[in-house]
């Protein structure tokens, strides 16, 4: 397999082109990896600053009063995505939607008070 990268300032977003004689398992895996990575970033707003939120840091994501919030050990962030959009970005083996308005991280302990 050959990999070629061209730097061109006229491209605002990166563009990936795969040239192949046929669709192979390797090509399918590459496409799958590229598709997964493109939508994994979740950013949140806190104290008028935007931060990239690591999936492993997320404890819960919930909707309240028309807004979506993410809770981490560092605090609560406002998200600009809808709950279903966030759900699509999170791995289903780690996060589960427990109601219409909440997603939890199965690998984090939640203490109910």
Image (cartoon, helix red, strand yellow):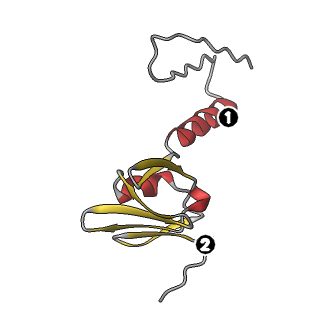
Coordinates of residue 112 in the picture (x, y in percent): 49, 86
Task: Examine the rendered structure and indicate whether residue 69 appears above or below residue 88.
Answer: below
Mark 1 or mark 2, whichever is nearer to me: 2
Q: Which mark is residue 108?
A: 2
**The N terminus - image quarter:** top right
Q: Which residue is mark 1?
A: 25
Measured as percent of width and height from the top left, residue 65 is found at 25, 68
Give the spatial CA distance, label 1 vs label 2: 35 Å
Secondary structure, mark 2, is loop
Q: Residues within 10 Å of mark 1 (few under 14, many from 20)?
A: few
Residue at 55% in and 42% down: 36
Specify the farthest residue to the right.
Answer: 1
Q: Are marks 1 and 2 in contact (CB under 8 Å)?
A: no
The residue nearer to you, when weighing 104 against 18, is 104
Which residue lies at the image location 58% right of the left edge and 33% below the top edge? 31
Instruction: State the image coordinates of residue 99 (x, y, percent, origin top left).
Output: 38, 74
Q: Secondary structure at mark 1?
A: helix
């Amino acid at each position: 397999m050959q990999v070629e990268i061209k730097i061109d300032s006229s491209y605002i977003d990166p563009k990936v082109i795969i040239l192949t004689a046929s669709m192979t398992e390797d090509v399918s895996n590459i496409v799958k990896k590229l598709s997964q990575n493109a939508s994994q970033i979740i950013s949140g707003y806190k104290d008028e600053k935007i931060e990239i939120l690591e999936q492993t840091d997320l404890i819960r994501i919930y909707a309240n009063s028309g807004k979506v919030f993410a809770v981490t050990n560092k605090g609560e962030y406002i998200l600009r995505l809808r709950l279903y959009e966030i759900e699509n970005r999170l791995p289903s083996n780690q996060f589960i939607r427990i109601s219409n308005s909440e997603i939890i991280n199965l690998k984090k302990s939640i203490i109910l008070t």
